[in-house]
Amino acid sequence: MRKASDSYQACVARTKAEERRDRLLNAANAVQQAGQALREAAAARNLHDLDPKGFKVPEIADDDFVDWAYENGMQTVGGRVIRDELMAAPLNERCPLCRQGTVRQLDHFMPKSHFPALCVDPLNLVPVCERCNLIKGNKRPDRAENTLLHPYLDRVSHEGWLDARSIHDSGTVRLRFFVSPPASWDATLIARVKNHFRLFELGKRYAIEANRAISDVTYSVERQRKRGGARMVRFYLEDEAESRFAVDLNSCEGITYRTLAADDLYCEGSSGQDSPSSVSSL
């Protein structure tokens, strides 16, 4: 990831208006200090303690600075390079906040309306889908427990934390996704992940994705059931889950197949509850 100072220079160095360019270049030290403060707070895990008063740019109004450095700066040749690098970072263009949508916009993790000096800092710019950007809005943390997960700083993907349970009701089976924290997580991280999960409505979104995943294997599940009953269905689903977990320990599809593999009623196809199309969101 580029340094905050390099990103800032790329965005403002070619400002056409000479007087404005001089003012922006003179603000470089303030921007660099703001970036350092952001990194120190991130390392100490106290982003919630950052005071917006320390992230103003001297002698430039907040709105003007954001317009000049970010809105205009990201349209320059140097700014577009920064933007393109950031937008290309997520694997398969998948939104890192929900792991479902396609990245379309850059979100300011610490809102630019409150922290203008961070408006072009790469550590503060997160590529996201439109839905997540709309949900997050200008929210900023005021305590550790409601600090959202930062894709660059919070590495939770190396441990399995997502799980689901199947619920049978009137001939249907529904999947309910929930946070199942590893024993190694402390109380603050658990609270943060649950807050993130709730804010972005991940349970509902993952259940919808589960519907699609189940529909994709409807034919194969029915074939396995005819060939060897519940045992063959279970083996098939476990194999599908394993292939997903090899890439992502918290794969929505992987969790879906693992959950259904452990559901005897689903594998047996009893009472009409074997229909994948009956899986619904909560």
Image (cartoon, grey):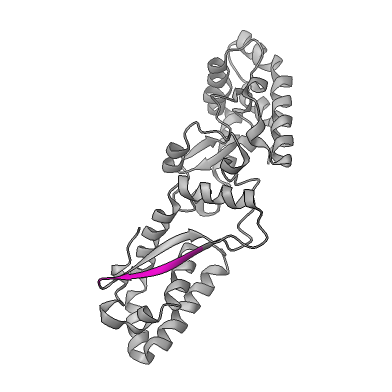
> Where 15 sits versus 32, above or below?
above
Residue at coordinates 35% horizontally, 84% vertically from top-left? Answer: 268
Q: Residue 216 at what x, y percent from top left?
A: 36, 70
Frontmost residue, 191 versus 14:
191
Place of residue 43 in the rendered image (x, y in percent of width and height, measured from the top left): 73, 41
Q: Give the range drawn in magenta.
A: 163-170
Q: In the rendered image, which quarter contains the C terminus?
A: bottom left
Magenta segment main secondary structure: strand
Q: Residue at x 41, y 42 (%)?
A: 131
The one nearer the camera, 34 or 1, is: 34
- Tell me if residue 122 can be seen: no
Residue 27 relative to residue 127: left or right? right
Q: Is residue 236 visible?
A: yes
The quadrant in which residue 181 appears is bottom right
Looking at the rendering, in which quadrant would you find the N terminus? top right
Q: Give the residue drawn at x 63%, y 24%.
A: 117
Q: Examine the image and state in which quarter residue 156 appears.
A: bottom right
